[in-house]
Every structure is written in C-alpha cells, then in structure tokens.
Amino acid sequence: MAYAYPLFFGDYLGVSIGQLYVLFSDREVIPMWRFDPLVRAVAVEAYALGLGLRQVAAFLGGLGFSVGRESIGRWFLRAGEMLSRGGVGRRGFIAVDETVVSNSAGRAYLWAAREVRSGDVVAVQVSRGRGLGECLRLLEKVKKRYRGRPTIYTDRGLWYVWPMKVLGIRHRRERFGMRNPIEQWFSRLKRRIRQFNLYFPTHKTKTTERWIRT
C-alpha cells in the first residue's frame, strides 16, 4: 500500500534528525521502544524527503532493521502531530481556498488556510461537499488560532460570504495578489502526491485530512 506524501513535514519546520531523535526518545510520544529512537528518526526523515514507505522499509532492512510500512507511517503521523502544534496568534492576514483531491471513494474537497506573511498553514479540512457548512467549519478553526479579527483573503466563491459575516471576520475577495501563497501551497502539495500515487488510498475524509495536516 503506497501512501500519498504528507506535506507539512515536507516543509519541515526546520526539523533535523537530532530533533526527531529527541522527540522519539520521549516515552510519552511513543511508549514502547521496540526500535531505537534513531531508527525512527531516520525513517521519518527519509519518508519526508521523498522516499515511499516501501522504499524506506527496504532501506532500513538493508541496515538490519525489519520495519513494516505501517509502523513507518504511524511514526510519521505521530511526529507530525507533535511538531505541528501551534499557539494562538495576535492577528493574521490569511489566504483561504479550496481544491479538489481524490481518494479511493472518489472526489473530495481540500480546504486550507495559510498565513500570508509567515507561510504557516493554520487550518486544513477535507470534505465531500463544498458549501456554507463546510466553509463555516474551516473558518471556525482559523478564528480559534487568532485573537481579535483576522483578515481573510479568498476568491469570489459565494460560500465564503455568509460564514465570514456570521463569524465577524474581515473579508477581502481577490483573484491573485494576497491569495498567491495558498495557490502555491496547493500546487506543491499536488506535485508531491503525484510522486507516490494519484489519490489517497482511503475512503475516509478524516484520514485523508490527517495525512495532509501532518
């Protein structure tokens, strides 16, 4: 089973093998130590840099470590979850957009919000539909990350107007300009997905969302 490339760890947050080693040495992160933390760190780094799960498993096998692909995937997700935890910002200029992704159940919509100045992706959501309810849920996630009223830039999709008013968010509608960061992120994500597969090998939107968020 080949998984699509989970993105945020690819941007990598400045994470080194040494930092991953420290993370995996913490028994609260992974309670059982069947493998040395350095093995886990090397596996996660190799996967994040572009190898598939099968390739990482083969690489570790050549070093004398028999590690299953599922274990490598779990290490990656756990590390990504721990390292991606963020606090609440004072204010933000945020680009929001949605795009189509595919998994084994067919077409789904990926919603994402990216801070314009820092480039941080602050919210991700995968849904079957593209409407007011889905948009409202994403914007609620974004608003929780900021004190006060963030300014959000979107395209001219009608599903953004009502949720913005309900949540009291400053809303700007643009085709390009301040929205470029989220368009660039989507392009990079889709390129990396194509390195491994054309779709996410799961029918569950929450599982797809978890891999992308990591």
Image (cartoon, helix red, strand yellow):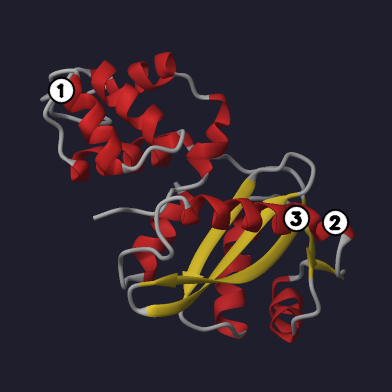
In percent of width and height, residue 101 lies at 50, 70
Sequence-wise, the earlier of marks 1 and 3 is 1
Q: Is residue 62 above or below residue 92?
A: above
Q: Is residue 128 visible?
A: yes
Q: Quadrant of residue 210?
A: bottom left
Q: How many marks?
A: 3
Q: Nearer the viewer, residue 61 or 166?
A: 61
User: What residue is disc 1 on?
Assistant: 35
Instruction: Specify the label residue 94 is tagged with.
Output: 3
Whether pointer 2 and pointer 1 mark residues with C-beta atoms closer than 8 Å, the reply is no
Taking the image as shown, residue 139 lies to the left or right of residue 126, namely right
Q: Nearer the viewer, residue 194 or 120?
A: 194
Amino acid residing under circle 3: Ile
Spatial CA distance of label 3 from label 2 is: 8 Å
Q: Residues within 10 Å of mark 1 (few under 14, many from 20)?
A: few
Spatial CA distance of label 2 from label 1 is: 45 Å
Judged from the image, the secondary structure of the residue bearing numbered disc 2 is: helix
Q: Residue furthest top?
A: 18
Q: Is residue 85 visible?
A: no
User: What residue is disc 2 on?
Assistant: 178
Q: Residues within 10 Å of mark 3 (few under 14, many from 20)?
A: many
Amino acid residing under circle 1: Phe
Amino acid residing under circle 2: Met
Sequence-wise, the earlier of marks 2 and 1 is 1
Judged from the image, the secondary structure of the residue bearing numbered disc 3 is: strand
Depth-wise, is mark 1 or mark 3 nearer the camera?
1
Taking the image as shown, residue 149 lies to the left or right of residue 146, namely right
